[in-house]
């Protein structure tokens, strides 16, 4: 089956990873949690538009690819709600004057995003007992009590969605891996402003940290958890 | 000047990042620290060989690119020793039976690397009061007291070298950024088993987390710190 | 000079610590930061009252001792404002339905404190660029980006005030110590619902983690920082 | 039943905590892990001696109380081995020249403990797949991958033993609580150089963070876990 990084990571490099023994499956556990990272209007725009139009509304917007992912996330969310599995929304909280630091150096435009941009995208907004997790840094684990929420819920597997693939998704997957959570990344439910970086980050995660598959495959694997436990 | 990712990240994607306001310089502070990550024989081999030969000795070896980077790291190390600036060696400690976890799932070959592979590469081995920092997970910060060592030394800037660009270097840079340390990544002093992933991870870091430049440029920038303070 | 724990920690135990070599001074650095922890109406009450009255308003209230400490904190705050030194307010954010965990087991009453209780005490409320730091767990460092704020501000010394001595103050001091920040605890600017536990926690911190002194002494020591640097 | 802090925390203070709603039981989960913290010869001496004699061998020694606790820990360890439950040994690793920091300020004598002192006490030494966890700071969680080991083992409950009650035990319990692990502290399986501080720290933990009981009671509660699951 074609991988998102085919045509970008050349065959001899993929073979090198195979020869060295990377990229085995870590598999799913029994208690998954859905992370929906930074799916706020600031990353998709208030409506679907091409990238160069979208960044006029919010410099952080990824454009159409974001809205495509939202549709896939909605399918995963529906399954998690039906199963009663936990759902957590790590999100960027509005920047305050005291938040200046390296982010303000590297991407000053991120400090002045309009408040409306921080709202959750309505199609997949939080409900009921979903955990809201404000964060100040890329990884959903860094400087947040995410690990405590996961331990309380006896989670063993993270299904990681949202954006950007090369930013907060990648950072959260690496930390989740380090904490020994299993991770599944549905490649069409994460998005990025660069398609090459998106693909290569999926490759990196697939080789070292997570199982990467389509949302279709992820839904099938997640639905099979119950059967395995029965 | 040509960037390591030119020809891999297409021009329109680089322009998109420019338009959105990413990739500004964070600059150097006044108190740099050199991190030499995982430069052990396990990642370069006991002698320079092509990749497919090198992995026969250690599955974790990156081959010739590692030895090329060692020469650049040696130049940086010489400057840090001359200035009396701190040098820290985050390194992978030998895997124990109790260390199984996600790493053993994804890359089981990493669990059985020969002990010799864990030795530091002699050309840039630790000395004197250098900090030795064993780690179990990718980022040099995760599950280690690295932040405590940096705070004790009043460090404000990390110069990050070693391997792999897409693994422990990337993870350490992202965490260093989140802690608000400035980061400089000399692109020829870090190495990886995939040249595409190496380049794209440099791009990601340059756009969001760190200043990426050659070792020549890094040495010039570091030497200028004293002049600025004088 | 009489210590807050004299009469509680018996002389032979104090002598034992002396003989074993504990309790040396760590001293102040050059860049102090004031932490005002959990000084919200929930911990002092909307007005000074005896403890058994105060807990009728908020079960978390400490009564008169809290208001006494507020007066001392105000003196420290005035100095920090005058010097332009950083001030950070770690505080308990209102409990959400998803916040259940060990705290809800051990002290269920803490889950239903009235919203008014979460307001900062007006006499020493945040201003300008003060950092507001919501937290979910005792230590101001746990699950928060406090370390990042301190690193950005090049802080080397924490002046820790607020409540409770045996809870969030103690937890924050232990973590600050582990991060290698110097810590000063003005014993009359921290408060607790138990005077014995207050005193013994000050003893523990003084022997192992922090310099403990009166606010008068702390102000003198802090004012001397500038002279030392001049 | 008499509590270790009766006679030290006066009745009116204990009543105040009852009135405010503190000190409920958190109970045991289903997957306990035994933490044996810092039970090395440096904390008990190579043989039982009175405190003022013991510190002549190692300034960190607690004397006879340590050996009394070792006997209780041995009983808990036997149960964990029989059940096949995980056992983790957080321990102080020998201090290196680069380890200076706040600890060297507050208790310089700790920097020069003889190497023999770092050996595990033979009566309860690690075996087989027990996890060895070197640490540089008080809490077994700080700067270590302890959380990762616990998550991999799906632990939900920590049984915390060793020393000192007011130091590394207390720090580890507070962090374990913040991570949402349940904690049980058998009060005769932890030890300290001050009996008053020992008792008050047990009180603090019992009121806010952990269930405190005798080793007899703890063994009964732990044996009941299987029955509950059957």
Image: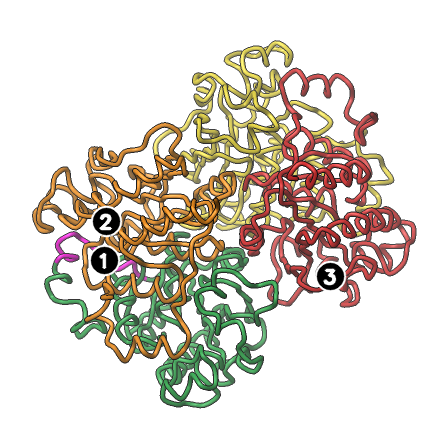
Chain colours: A green, B orange, C red, D yellow
Whether B115 is drawn above or below A62: the answer is above
Q: Label 3: which residue? A: C126
- Mark 3–mark 1 Cα distance, whole angstroms, equals 51 Å
Number of marks: 3
Badge number at residue A24: 1
Whether labels 3 and 1 share one chain: no
The foreground one among C33 and C60 is C33
Residue A191 seen from this side = no
Question: Percent from the top left, x then y, of residue D159?
Answer: 55, 39
Which of labels 3 and 1 is toward the front? Answer: 3
A48 lies left or right of D204: left
* C-alpha separation, residue under disc 3 versus residue under disc 2: 52 Å
Left or right, C191 with reference to D148 = right
- Relative to C155, residue D104 above or below: above
| Of A164 and D42, the residue lying toward us | A164
Mark 3 nearby-residue class (10 Å; few <14, some 14–19, many ≥20):
some
Label 2–label 1 contact, CB within 8 A: yes
At mark 3, the secondary structure is: loop
Q: Which residue is mark 2?
A: B108
Corner quadrant of residue B100: top left
Chain hosting mark 1 = A
């Amino acid at each position: 089956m074609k991988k998102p990084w085919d045509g970008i990571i050349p065959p001899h490099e993929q073979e090198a990873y195979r020869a060295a023994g990377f990229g085995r499956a870590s598999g799913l556990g029994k208690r998954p949690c859905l992370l929906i990272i930074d799916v706020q209007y600031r990353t998709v725009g208030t409506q679907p538009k091409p990238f160069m139009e979208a960044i006029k509304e919010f410099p952080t917007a990824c454009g159409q690819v974001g809205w495509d992912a939202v549709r896939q996330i909605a399918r995963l969310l529906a399954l998690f709600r039906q199963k009663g599995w936990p759902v957590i929304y790590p999100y960027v909280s509005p920047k305050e004057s005291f938040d200046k630091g390296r982010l303000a150096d590297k991407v000053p435009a991120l400090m002045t995003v309009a408040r409306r941009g921080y709202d959750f995208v309505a199609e997949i907004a939080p409900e009921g007992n979903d955990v809201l997790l404000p964060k100040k840094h890329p990884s959903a684990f860094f400087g947040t009590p995410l690990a405590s929420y996961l331990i309380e819920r006896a989670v063993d597997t993270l299904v990681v969605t949202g954006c950007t693939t090369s930013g907060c998704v990648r950072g959260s997957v690496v930390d989740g891996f380090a904490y020994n959570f299993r991770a599944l990344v549905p490649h069409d439910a994460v998005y990025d402003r660069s398609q090459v970086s998106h693909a290569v980050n999926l490759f990196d995660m697939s080789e070292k940290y997570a199982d990467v598959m389509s949302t279709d495959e992820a839904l099938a694997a997640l639905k099979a958890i119950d059967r395995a436990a029965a």
